[in-house]
Amino acid sequence: MEPAACSVDLTGAVSSVRLLKINGYAATSTMTKLEYIKYSWKVDGHDWEVLCYPQHHELYGSCVKLKLIFLGKAQCQPHKVTATLICRPVDPSPTRTKLSPFDDRRGVSASFCHAQDSSPPLFLLVRRNIGMNTCDYLANDSLTIHCTISVLKLKELLSDGVVFIPEPAKEGVPLPIVPPSDLHRHLGELFLSEKGADVTFVVCGESFPAHKILLATRSPVFMAEFFGHMKESHSRRVEVEGMEPAVFGAMLRFIYTDDVAMAELDEAAVSSSMHGGAPACGG
């Protein structure tokens, strides 16, 4: 005799969904990468903001960057709040070929303890340049993004099967000290060592070995290029035109480490000015 099936819900969640709309999207071309559009709403008694940065350009197209900001509760309590932000662009023509062969949704989760705590950024591909054509999610110069904020509540299971939600931590109880992440350092060492590289970018005759899976994880454009149906998906060598080696190298370093070597960019700018402001080589 088989035992009866049993399941226990260990999480609870309160979710809120909104459509974020940017009318007159062309006007955002005057914004810098540090400027954003702010959307505010309340979920599970907490105040939140979603910051949308329209001007984030990739190698083969344009993205918008979004971050979730925790504004704290009206009566602030010293406990951790865990939330997720899931976004996707709304396609005005759902019957056409998608920009990416993958699910267009992107999500990020984070734990928030203080007002103004921020989630890591997520990136949505909204425009893609394919040869002489442009494919995008814009309709009548308007972009719509479907966003969901979910506030999670972890539950604990007692020996008698009773499920409860833990109370917030009491004031005065010290939080454990967690060492800062050094993931960026390890990825930087991987970038410099070139070990395990499975693709090489060639810029003006200079080679830049890299790792497809890491690039795809960081960029939806590279995800489509290497793991979609593009010709580069099985290629181990990609020619890059219209960009100087120093600029491309700085871009790769940023992808691996979130750090930009300004000295390299300054050197590239000087080189560009010496050539009359034109790219050193390529298209």
Image (spheres, helix red, strand yellow):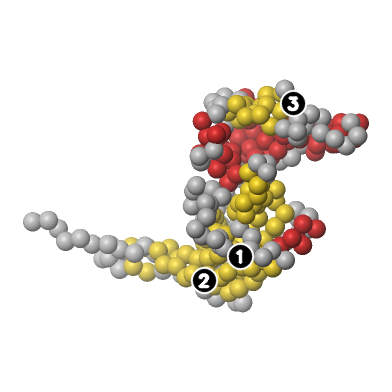
State the residue at coordinates (63%, 48%).
Answer: 128
Choose the circle earlier in sequence order: 3 or 1. Answer: 1
| Mark linked to residue 144 | 1
Instruction: Provide residue 116's location: percent of width, then percent of height.
Output: 67, 63
State left or right for residue 159 relative to residue 29.
Answer: left
Q: Is residue 32 left or right of residue 252?
A: right
Q: Position of residue 35 (x, y in %)?
A: 76, 59
- Residue at disc 2, secondary structure: strand
Q: Nearer the viewer, mark 2 or mark 1?
A: 1
State the residue in front, 186 or 34.
Answer: 34
| Dot 2 alpha-carbon crowd within 10 angstroms: few under 14, some 14 to 19, many 20 or more | few
Q: CA distance from mark 3 to mark 2?
A: 49 Å
Q: Which of the 4 quarters of the picture holds residue 260? A: top right
The disc, 2 or 1, on the residue closer to the chain's N-terminal end is 2
What residue is at 76 percent from the left and 30 percent from the top?
A: 282
Q: Which residue is mark 3?
A: 204
The residue type indicated by label 2 comes to Ser
Task: Depth check: give the residue in front, 49 or 268.
Answer: 268
The picture places residue 188, in percent across and down from the top left corner, at 64, 33
List the residue tagged with mark 2. 16
In primary-sequence order, the first of circles 3 and 2 is: 2
Secondary structure type for disc 3: loop
- Evaluate if marks 3 and 1 touch, with contact meaning CB atoms under 8 Å apart: no
Relative vertical location of residue 212 with respect to residue 127 in this rendering, above or below: above
Badge 3 density bin: few <14, some 14–19, many ≥20, Cα 10 Å: some
Q: Amino acid at mark 3?
A: Cys
Q: Which mark is residue 201?
A: none
**Structural distance between the alpha carbons of marks 3 and 1:** 39 Å
Q: Is residue 53 left or right of residue 218?
A: right
Type of residue at label 1? Answer: Thr
Q: Please, what secondary structure does the residue beneath circle 1 have?
A: strand
